[in-house]
Image (cartoon, helix red, strand yellow):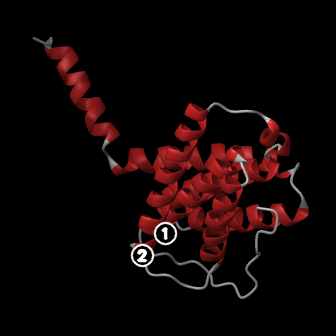
Amino acid sequence: MTPPKKAAKKATEKIIKHHPEHHQSSDLRRAYEHMSRVGILQKSLKLSDAKVVTALATLARQHLENGRNQEAADLLKGAEHLSFAALADQESKKVQLSVELVQSITGHFNELTQRAEKHWKECEEGPDVLTVIFKSSLKNAIKALKHGAYHEALELARAAESLADVKRQGPHKQKRSKKAPKPTAL
C-alpha cells in the first residue's frame, strides 16, 4: 500500500500534468526550444530553404501572440525538421545500409506519411502557406525515399506530420498568402 504522503503527491502531480495551464507552459517551452534550434540551423540554410523555414517561424510567432502555444511549437518543430532535411548530407546515399535497416526506415516512413495524410484530410483545406509547405514536404519526402536519401526522407515526413498536427488541432486564424514560398530544395 502506498503511504498517504506519496499517494497525495502522486495525485497532485497527475492533476498538474493534466491541467491546461501546465500544457500551455510546456508548449511555450517547446516553442522556445524549437525556435532556438531553428535559429541556429537557419544560418546554414540556402536562401530558398531559409524562406520556407522563415514562413513557418512567422506563422508560429502569430500563433504565440494569439496564445496558441501548441500550434506554435508544432510549426517550429516542422521548421526544425525541414531545416535538417535541407542540410541532410547527400553523401548518406552512398552509405550501404542493411536490408533490415532499410525495411525499418521504410516502415517508419510509411507510418509517418500515413499519419500525416490522415490528419491532414480530417481538416478543411485552404490555399495557405501551410498547405503549400505540407504538400511539398510530403511530395519531396516520397521522392527522397525513392532515391535512397533516407535521412532526408524521414525528416521531410516528420515535418509533414508536424504540420498536419497543427492543422488538426483546430480552426486557425492563419493569414492567407498569395505568395506562399515554394520549397525548392526540400
Residue extending farthest to the bottom is: 178
Q: Give the x, y percent position of residue 81.
A: 67, 50
Residue 100 versus residue 90 in the image, above or below: above
Q: Residue at x 39, y 49 (%)?
A: 21
Q: Is residue 36 visible?
A: no
Q: Amino acid at mark 2?
A: Cys
> Which sits in the foreground, 1 or 47?
47
Q: Residue at x 76, y 66 (%)?
A: 52
> Which sits in the foreground, 7 or 91?
91
In primary-sequence order, the first of circles 2 and 1 is 2
Residue 123's tag is 2
94 left or right, relative to 153: right
Q: Residue at x 19, y 15 (%)?
A: 5
Q: Give the x, y percent position of residue 96.
A: 74, 33
Q: Give the x, y percent position of residue 103.
A: 54, 40
Q: Amino acid at mark 1?
A: Lys
Residue 60 versus residue 4 in the image, above or below: below
Residue 24 versus residue 185 in the image, above or below: above
Q: Is residue 10 visible?
A: yes
Residue extending farthest to the front is: 99
The answer to whether mark 2 and mark 1 are in CB contact below 8 A is yes
**Residue 45 occupies which quadrant of the picture?**
bottom right
- Residue tagged 1: 167
